[in-house]
Amino acid sequence: MAYKTILLVEDNPDEEVLMVRALRKNNIIDKIIIARDGAEAIKAIESEDRIDVVFLDLNLPVMGGMDVLSYVRSKSGLNNIPIVILSSSKEDADITRSYQLGANSYVNKPIDFSDFTSTVKSLGAYWLNINRLPSEG
């Protein structure tokens, strides 16, 4: 399953390159938008016609990932976008809080490409079988 549009919110250029490479190698995306901080992420989410999934780093400059997640989940019309948290934190409190705020998945960094790809594909299957992708209506 290919997503039409993915928003990757990542401030580390090396991590960004690796994730984009993994997504493209597996033909998972048609379009990717990059945001390097939380404020850019909000702007992209609000200005794009559709975003099918957001990959969101927690530790971001300007506005943190938890704040972005909370904002998106509070907005009608945006709150159905699947959000995958990307974080080096393995703290139970961060993981629990992410899910409490509405994250669909939590992936630890450094990214294992097999796990990352599997997470992306399983989210796609979820949206195909249970819901519709946001871009489908």
Image (tube, grey):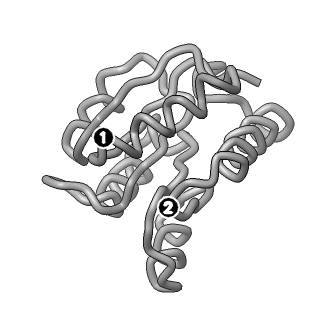
Q: Quadrant of residue 121?
A: top right
Q: Residue at x 70, y 53 (%)?
A: 115
Quadrant assignment for the N terminus = top right
Q: Is residue 4 placed above or below 44 in the rendered structure? A: above
Residue pointed to by mark 2:
109
Q: Nearer the viewer, residue 106 or 136?
A: 106
Identity, as a three-letter code, of the amino acid under mark 1:
Pro
Q: Is residue 92 placed above or below 120 in the rendered structure? A: below
Q: Horizontal and vertical percent for residue 35? A: 29, 35
Q: Residue at x 52, y 85 (%)?
A: 92
Element on which disc 2 rests:
loop
Q: Horizontal and vertical percent for residue 22? A: 60, 34
Q: Is residue 104 left or right of residue 61?
A: right
Q: Dot 1 surroundings within 10 Å: few (below 14), some, or many (20 or more)?
A: few
Q: Is residue 56 placed above or below 130 in the rendered structure? A: below
Q: Horizontal and vertical percent for residue 68? A: 32, 53
Closer to the chain start, of discs 1 and 2, is 1
Q: Dot 2 surroundings within 10 Å: few (below 14), some, or many (20 or more)?
A: some
Identity, as a three-letter code, of the amino acid under mark 2:
Lys
Element on which disc 1 rests:
helix
Q: Nearer the viewer, residue 34 or 103?
A: 34
Q: What is the CA distance from the residue labelled 1 to the residue labelled 2?
A: 14 Å
Q: Residue furthest right?
A: 129
The disc at residue 92 is none
Q: Horizontal and vertical percent for residue 89? A: 44, 74
The disc at residue 13 is 1
Q: Residue furthest left?
A: 62
Q: Residue at x 43, y 32 (%)?
A: 7
